[in-house]
Amino acid sequence: MDPLIKSAKEGDHLAFAILFKENYPFLVKYLMKITMNPDMAEELAQETMAKCIQKINLYNGQSKFSTWLISIATNAYIDQCRKQKRENNWRGQEEVYRKLKWHFESRNEEWNDALEALGKLPVDVRVPIVLKHYYGYSYDEIGAWMKISSGTVKSRVHNGILAVRRELKLGEETEGRHTRQRTTK
Amino acid sequence: MKKQKVVILDNAQQNKHDLDAIHKIQEGLSKVDQFPVYTPDLQWFESMVRTEKENSRKKLRKELSLFLIIALFILSGIIVSFYQMPGVFIFIQIITPVFIAYYTISRISKKVKINE
């Protein structure tokens, strides 16, 4: 195990601080991708670090420290969404990506339609897509973090990709041509 | 035979569209990675760790004392009822497992509904 993690487990504050400082940009950027809201990402990053301090004894060193952080952050975000839903405070999905879009525009970056399509997806579909197709985690790992079976993760990712395709109008021409051919037959 | 060929071609085309969509998502997300993220200095992280540890220690102390007070209260109530009102004692012994079973089942069914 990494000596820094060992020291952190023994209660060394500085070791914890170094670990967090090293992983902070990675964590915030991951949270930005799943929440699509830079402010919420920073808020959740702090919550994740707090949970990490409480649960450090459960970290067994089998996976990378950053991977462990991602699993805690994913659960923190899902929990927050559930809480908001329960409090009837759930903002519309459309609003989710608006802040990110604003950040893109303020930096003169070209907005990507795929991000908008991703932002329109429900949280439990968006998160596995990001984890699978951007970070390359396996269906089993994602399922374990989200407390669902790997088959469910697979179907959510598949349906999510289909929804993004529909939104981006990818393959509509060919689909249309096929239906036209079928009707003429 | 011909029909099978068409199906294979369709699948390949579907996969190509899926890959295109995935590629576009990756392209968009990689732009997010280029965003500058302000990272606080080491002292900030250290004080955050210290505060968080202090908070969790306080929380643990509070929860433990609350647990001990409640346990003491329940235990003294049971002892008093055992010696003074045996009828109430037997009633409590029956009603407690029934309540625990009902609560557990209702929580599990709620969780299942949420996951559905």
Image: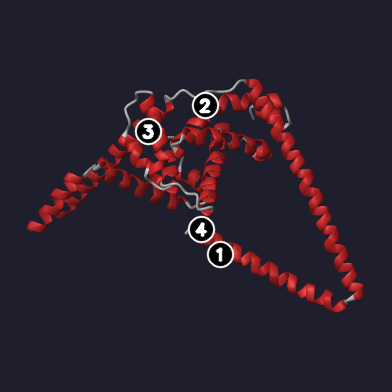
For label 3, the residue is: A101
The residue under label 2 is A25
> What kind of residue is marked 2?
Pro
| Mark 1: amino acid | Ser
Query: Which of the chains bears the disc numbered 2?
Result: A
Q: Nearer the viewer, mark 3 or mark 1?
A: 3
Mark 3 and 2 residues: CB-CB less than 8 Å, in contact?
A: no
Q: Quick one: label 4 or label 1, which is nearer the N terminus? A: 1
Residue B37, above or below A68: above
Q: Which residue is mark 1?
A: B109
Task: Give the numbered dot on residue A53.
Answer: none
Q: Please give the name of the residue rendered at 90% of the width and 69% of the height, measured from the top-left corner.
A: B80
Which residue is found at the position 48% from the left and 44% from the top? A142
> How was this image coloured?
secondary structure
| Quadrant (top left, top right, bottom left, bottom right) of the N terminus of chain B | bottom left
**Relative to A104, is B90 on the left or the right?**
right
Which secondary structure, mark 4? helix
Chain ID of residue with mark 3 = A
Residue tagged 4: B114
